[in-house]
Amino acid sequence: MPELALQPGSWVFVTGVNGLIGSHIADQLLARGYNVRGAVRDVEKCNWLKEYFDDKYSQQDAAKFELVAVPDMAVEGCYDDVVKGTHGFIHVASPLHGPDARVLVPLTVQGALNAAKAAAKTPTVTRFVFTSSSIAATIPKPNVKFSIDASSFNDAAVEKAFNYPADEPQELKGMYNYAALKTAAERAMWKFVNEEKPGFVFNSVLPNANYGKVLIPTQQGTPSTIAWAHAAFTGELWDLHRSRIPPQYFIDTVDTALLHVSALIHASVSNERLFGFAEPFHWDKILGIFRRIYPERTFPADDPADDRRDLMTVPNKRAEEVLGWVKGGGEGWTGLEVSLREMSEAWV
C-alpha cells in the first residue's frame, strides 16, 4: 500500500459535511479512525448528523466527530479559527444554484479561496482536497467523440454563463452557471496553490453524476443528482428530466467520498486532478436496470427515438487506481446497477 501522509487519529476539516458527498466523506474518514470536524451553516439544525455519527461510532476509543458553524463561507477569514488544530482540509461546500453568474461565480471563488487561505495559515494542515466537478472540465456532448485530459477546463461554459445567448433555451442557463462556478473556483484554487505555494499538498476531485446510497435519506432526501434517478424511478417530472439531462458518466456516491479520502491521506497523490468517471449511462439503460431490480413496479417507457450516448474518452485510470487503495481488495469502480440498487432501497 502507498505511504500514508495522514495517520489515523489526525483531525480532518470537512466543509459542507451535511450534504450528499460531505456526509459520506465524514463517514469514510471516521470508519478509518480519522477525527472529523465538519462545517455547516447552523449547528443546531444539523445536530441529526452528529447524533447519527455518535451512535454509529459509539465504541470506546472511536474516532471523534464534531460540528462547527460557518454561516457564510464568502466572509473573509470565516474558516481561520475553526480550522485550527486540524491536519487535513476537504472543501466540499459550494453554491449549486443561482440566476446570475455575476453573483454566483465570485461568491463561489471567494468561498474556495477563504478555505485555501485558512489552511495556508494553519501550520498543521499538510493536505488539502477540493471538490470540483466533471462540468469544470467539460459539458456532456451526446453522440460526439472527443476526449478530455488533466489540462481540460470548461472555459467556454464560463463565457456562456456570463454572456448567455438570448436565442438559447433559458432553462439551460442554470447548467452553465453551475459549470462556470465550478470551473472558475477550481482554476482559482490551482492559481492560489501555484503562486502562493502553501505548506499543504493540493488535489482536486472531479466527479460526474453521483448515484448511490444517500447516507441519511430521512434527513437528506434526494439531493443533487440523486433527484435525476429518482425522477426515472417515480415518473415525477420525468419528461422534463429526460429532455434536459443528457447521457453522461456516473460515479457511486461512496466512490466519490473514497476518492477524496485517498487523495487526502496518501502521500503519492500530489497536485493531481482525479476524474471520477466510472461508466457512461443513458436513460433507457437506467430504466432497464430498475425493471430488473423491481419487476413488480411500473416505470416510464423507453424512448427509441432518444439515441443519445456519451462517447467521450476520459482520463479516469489514475482515479480508479487511487480508489482501489482504500477499497477492500483493491477493487475499482462500483457498477451502475449496484449503485442504483443501493440508492433506490430507500424509496420502496
Image (cartoon, grey):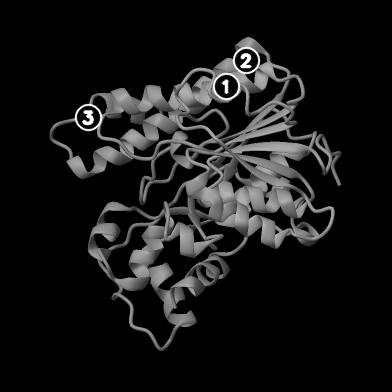
Up/down of 277 relative to 106, above or below: below
Q: Secondary structure at mark 2?
A: helix
Residue at the image point whose x is 45% and y is 41% from the top: 146
Q: Amino acid at mark 3?
A: Tyr
Q: Please name the residue that numbered disc 2 is placed on.
A: 194
**Marks 2/3: CA distance?**
31 Å
**Marks 2/1: CA distance?**
6 Å
| Numbered label tally | 3
Residue 142 versus residue 326: which sits nearer the camera? 326
Residue 234 x/y as whole percent: 33, 72
State yes or no: discs 2 and 1 in contact (Cβ < 8 Å). yes
Q: Please name the residue that numbered disc 3 is placed on.
A: 164
Locate residue 157 relative to residue 266 in the image: left or right. left
Residue at the image point whose x is 53% and y is 72% from the top: 341
Residue at the image point whose x is 44% and y is 73% from the top: 347
Q: Secondary structure at mark 3?
A: loop
Locate residue 275 relative to residue 229 in the image: left or right. right
Residue 159 x/y as whole percent: 31, 24
Q: Secondary structure at mark 1?
A: helix
Q: Earlier in the sequence, mark 1 or mark 3?
A: 3
Residue 149 x/y as whole percent: 55, 34
